[in-house]
Image (cartoon, helix red, strand yellow):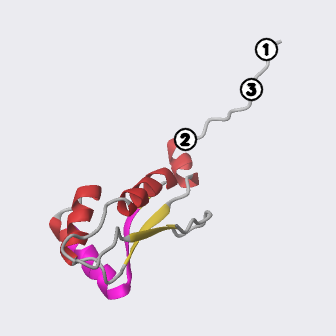
Amino acid sequence: MPTTLPDTHIDQGTQDALTPLYHLVLLDDDEHSYEYVIEMLMKLFCLSADQAYRHAVEVDASGRTIVLTAELPLVSFGRDQIHSYGADYRIPKCKGSMSAIIEPAAGGGGGQNC
């Protein structure tokens, strides 16, 4: 007599709904210029100059801006890229890269501040 296995298929829509998403949040500081932020976001995240400028304005005005919302491996990679981008040569007192943190997107999942 043949044995039937339970249907364990999960359709793509259900799988996407189950995958937790995270925000990559760029934090403001006084050691990086608008030009640095715009250049970095354009190079690392392929943003247009206008999109990058809007993020620069937001991070300056509110102290933070969400650069990317995605699955944890991609957001972690983006954070690492920001942290390794280097100092702003335009500002002599600048000692290194900007800071970024990872937060769970609305709807749950654990967070990771870095």
Picture quadrant of residue 88: bottom left
Q: Is residue 63 magenta?
A: yes
Instruction: Tally the numbered discs.
Output: 3
For the residues labelled 3 and 2, the Cα–Cα distance comes to: 17 Å
Write down the residue under mark 1.
2
For the residues labelled 3 and 1, the Cα–Cα distance comes to: 10 Å
Residue 99 x %, y %: 41, 71
Write down the residue under mark 3.
5
Residue drawn 20% across the image and 65% down it = 39
Residue 85 x %, y %: 31, 60
Q: Say what amino acid the circle numbered 1 marks.
A: Pro
Q: Say what amino acid the circle numbered 2 marks.
A: Asp
Instruction: Tell me if mark 1 has few (under 14), some (14-19) or many (20+) residues whose alpha carbon lies within 10 angstroms of its own.
Output: few
Q: Magenta stretch?
A: 51-68
Q: Nearer the viewer, residue 54 or 56?
A: 56
Identify the mark nearer the N-term, 2 or 1.
1
Instruction: Tell me if mark 2 has few (under 14), some (14-19) or many (20+) residues whose alpha carbon lies within 10 angstroms of its own.
Output: few
Residue drawn 79% across the image and 14% down it = 2
Q: Residue furthest right?
A: 1
Picture quadrant of residue 41: bottom left
Q: Say what amino acid the circle numbered 3 marks.
A: Leu
For the residues labelled 2 and 1, the Cα–Cα distance comes to: 26 Å
Q: Is 27 on the left-hand or right-hand side of 88?
A: right
Instruction: Tell me if mark 3 has few (under 14), some (14-19) or many (20+) residues whose alpha carbon lies within 10 angstroms of its own.
Output: few
